[in-house]
Amino acid sequence: MDLTYTAEEEDFRARLRAWLQRVLPKLPPRPAPDDWPGRRAYDLGWQRMLYDAGYAGLHWPVDAGGQGATPTQHLIYLEETERAGAPYVGANFVGLLHAGPTIAAVGTADQRARWLPPVLRGDEVWCQGFSEPDAGSDLASLRTRAVRDGDAYVVSGTKIWTSHAEVADWCELLVRTDPDAPKHRGISWLAMPMDAPGVTVRPLRTLAGSTEFAEMFLDEVRVPVANRVGAEHDGWRVTMVTLSFERGTAFVGEVVACRRTLGQLAAEARKNGRWDDPVLRRRLGRLSAEFGALWRLTQWNVSEAQHQRTGGVPGTGGSVFKLRYSHARQELYDTAAAVLGPDSLDLAREWNLDRLSALSYTIAAGTSQIQRDIVAERILGLPKGR
Ligand SMILES: Cc1cc2nc3c(=O)[nH]c(=O)nc-3n(C[C@H](O)[C@H](O)[C@H](O)COP(=O)(O)OP(=O)(O)OC[C@H]3O[C@@H](n4cnc5c(N)ncnc54)[C@H](O)[C@@H]3O)c2cc1C
């Protein structure tokens, strides 16, 4: 990957910057953090604006409805949207960043045509029904059953920590289709309509006060067999594709936001006098180097994910990024507390809510312990743990 910009790329940047300057002032005010229907409408509205302007699915393959942009254009997009303070994907996280890319990589032509355009147009929201009360890190031990009945699966079981379930139209759902097979072999990946009879969603409140995720109870829900992505019982392979996107590229846009937050913290420290503390200055400096390195890793991951060699799917290197990023994000917000002092207890300030939510980053999308196992076994080639 060439890290210098061509005239064409600079032109792309200039056009994007001009467009952002024009449209951002016209956006409605952001809804309150816990107004999920409001947030859904806001996030879908922004996605629609991107779609109408030709920026939706910028880096997705053209045959998946994307623009087929280069990794460099994608990175420019991330830089410029964040620099301008544009909304991030929000409720579109699953659809845009891992369910959609999975369908693009593994789905049939009909499945791509059914599910990808509404994600790109900002018409439909997805959620992820992977974790269960007894299947988190050991995801392959999931027990939600799907029994074939004619042209449908009848699905029963319980899912948990399903982000955005309350406002989702579709769920990427893992089910056990063969209870007698070894645990990794009897799983299938389904697209479940959230309005199907038998789906009950019970929101869960986080310590930040938000109901961003939910429990999901499935009672004989009929899901058409045509909604299965990948072969029957081969859902674990599809799951690995989804998790590669979730760990490898889904968080990359946030690195730019963290670098901006770091700059704001330094400015705040100068204003409130804490800049005189050399220990704090060193922390800020070290974080700046850390996020600089993470941005380089982001460039690598984005480039890798779009490389033909991997079939457009990120590799296990995503675990290195996810591991380091989630810890750096927590350190960033701990440092924010040191900069803000007593103000850091005021939950009305947005970065205090961000600080609380940073705690979840070393758990969501696979815990740090699990990422370390992946790095040890699959990248460093160390012997398998017990
Ligand atoms: C904010 C947030 C959003 C989420 N959104 C979703 C979502 O939308 N959809 C979804 O399906 N899930 C979601 N999750 C769930 C998430 O994927 C799980 O919480 C995660 O995989 C860990 O599983 P668990 O909570 O069952 O913990 P457990 O697996 O029970 O782990 C408990 C502890 O034991 C450790 N541990 C477990 N196994 C090992 C091992 N083999 N070696 C070493 N240590 C081990 C873990 O690291 C952890 O510290 C979300 C979680 C969070 C926090």
Image (cartoon, grey):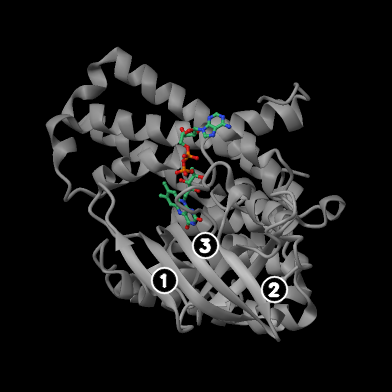
Q: Residue at x 30, y 13 (%)?
A: 278
Mark 3 Cβ and ligand 1 under 8 Å apart: yes
Q: Nearer the viewer, residue 58 or 164?
A: 164
Q: Report the residue marked by disc 2.
A: 228
Residue 324 in the image: state x and y as whole percent. Answer: 54, 32
From this view, report whether residue 312 is shown above or below residue 269: below
Q: Identify the residue at image location x=24%, y=65%.
A: 32
What residue is pinned by disc 3?
Answer: 129
Examine the image and state in which quarter residue 102 appears: bottom right
Q: Amino acid at mark 3?
A: Gly
Q: Residue 224, how many percent across, how many down?
A: 65, 83
Instruction: Say what secondary structure mark 1 lies in.
Output: helix
Tell which residue pokes out farthest to the front in this image. Answer: 180
Mark 1: few/some/many CA within 10 Å (<14, 14-19, 20+): many
Q: Counting other residues with Cα less than 10 Å from the Cα at mark 2, is it few (<14), some (14-19), or many (20 or more)?
A: many
- Compared across the picture, whether 374 is left or right of 209 comes to right
Identified by mark 1, the residue type is: Asp
Between disc 3 and disc 1, the foreground one is 3
